[in-house]
Image: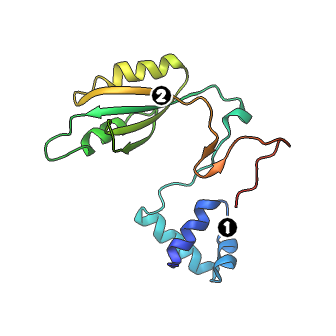
Amino acid sequence: MDKNKELLSLLTQDCRRTPRQLAAILGESEDEVRQRIAKLESSGAIVKYSAILNDEMLDRDSVHAMIEVKVTPQKSKGFDAIAEEICRYPEVKSVYLISGDFDLAVFIEGKSLRSVSLFVSEKLSAIESVLSTATHFILKKYKVEGVVTTKTGGGRLPVQP
């Protein structure tokens, strides 16, 4: 396996691993691992490190939604310019170009159903290239980024392979 692919796989599984721990797993020097991580970060291959939160355990009162968006692609810019415009909104967490009946999948987080509704009606639908939307509210998250987030019988999260 490519050295960077293996390093990235380990960081994706648990970004809390230290360069010393990664070096031990990879059979490399700590300094070499630090240098490779620094290169991956500066090149933009590693964009961000983040924690996956279990909203139910934290009793967070936010509303998450996935909005399918049908758009008219812009001449010579395709979907990119529209996606970039949508990305500017702080409530937007992710934007993906998708296949099927819609063109974009937009994931947002709002404080309430009303705030999500206002985002769709006043911001997203107001973009000239947006033809239609379909909003899906996320009711429960069972698995996020490859990690099961729901409790099992004993009240503990299952061990990830």
The residue tagged 2 is: 136
Q: How many marks?
A: 2
Q: Nearer the viewer, residue 9 or 103?
A: 103
At horizontal 48% and vertical 28% (from top left) the residue drawn is: 136
In the rendered structure, the answer to whether residue 47 lies left or right of residue 126 reads right
| Image position of 130 with respect to 103: above or below | above
Image x and y of residue 58, in percent: 72, 34
> Is 29 on the left-hand or right-hand side of 92?
right
The location of residue 147, given as percent across then percent down, is 64, 50
What x and y, as percent, mark residue 56? 70, 33
| Distance Cα–Cα, label 1 vs label 2 | 38 Å
SS of the residue at dot 2?
Answer: strand
Q: Residues within 10 Å of mark 2 (few under 14, many from 20)?
A: few
**In the rendered image of this protein, does residue 150 appear above or below residue 116?**
below
Mark in the foreground, 1 or 2: 2
Q: Is residue 159 above or below residue 9?
A: above
Is 113 drawn above or below residue 24 in the view shown?
above
**On-image quarter of the C terminus:** bottom right
Specify the color scheme. rainbow
Tell me the number on the disc at residue 18.
1
Residue at left offset 32%, top offset 36%? 101
Image location of residue 156, percent across then percent down = 81, 45
